[in-house]
Image (spheres, rainbow, N blue to C red):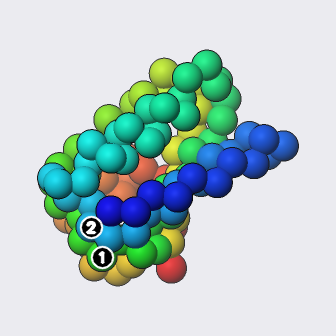
């Protein structure tokens, strides 16, 4: 999985553009990327752009829940954007579409 981080200090946003599959083999990479950016950064908005993510499994979902909670501890917000329909269906089936701030393509 490829992860590109874009930071806008003026808007206090960090956007992580993900490419590939968010599954058991790649969740640690995402955790590392987001965790490193959380240090002493209260009140930021973190955006996960899933426009190039073609597959999401239960490990990926679990990591997204973990990340949302960690960001909440830092008084930040998490938005997940550009979700492809097959990935969005996973959120709907698990009812996590109500837990996350989501937007589709």
At a point 36% along the width and 58% down the height, the residue shown is 97
* Left or right for 40, reference 51: right
Q: Residues within 10 Å of mark 1 (few under 14, many from 20)?
A: some
- Residue 74 lies, in percent from the top left, at 55, 23
Above or below for 53 versus 65: below
**Most foreground residue, 34 or 11:** 34
* Left or right for 57, reference 101: left
Q: Residue furthest right?
A: 10
Residue 53 in view: yes
Number of the label disc, if any, that sits on residue 21:
2
- Residue 87 lies, in percent from the top left, at 30, 71
At a point 67% along the width and 29% down the height, the residue shown is 43
Residue identifier under label 1 = 54
**Most foreground residue, 17 or 102:** 17
Above or below for 34 versus 19: above
At a point 44% along the width and 32% down the height, the residue shown is 35
Disc 2, SS: strand
Cβ atoms at labels 2 and 1 below 8 Å apart:
yes
Q: Residues within 10 Å of mark 2 (few under 14, many from 20)?
A: some
At a point 32% along the width and 35% down the height, the residue shown is 66
**Most foreground residue, 89 or 81:** 81
Q: Compute the Cα span from label 2 to label 1.
A: 6 Å
Disc 1, SS: strand
Quarter of the image containing the N terminus?
A: bottom left
- Residue 84 lies, in percent from the top left, at 39, 78
The numbered mark, 2 or 1, whose residue comes first in the sequence reads: 2
- Residue 30 lies, in percent from the top left, at 36, 47
Residue 92 in view: no
Count of marks placed on residues? 2
């Amino acid at each position: 999985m490829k992860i590109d981080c874009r930071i806008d200090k003026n808007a206090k946003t960090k956007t992580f553009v993900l490419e590939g599959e968010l599954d058991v083999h790649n969740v640690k990479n995402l955790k590392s990327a987001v965790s490193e950016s959380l240090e002493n950064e209260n009140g930021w908005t973190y955006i996960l752009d899933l426009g190039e993510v073609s597959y999401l499994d239960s490990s990926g979902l679990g990591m997204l829940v973990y990340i949302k909670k960690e960001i909440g501890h830092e008084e930040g917000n998490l938005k997940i954007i550009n979700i492809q329909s097959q990935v969005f269906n996973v959120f709907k089936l698990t009812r996590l579409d109500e837990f996350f701030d989501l937007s589709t393509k």
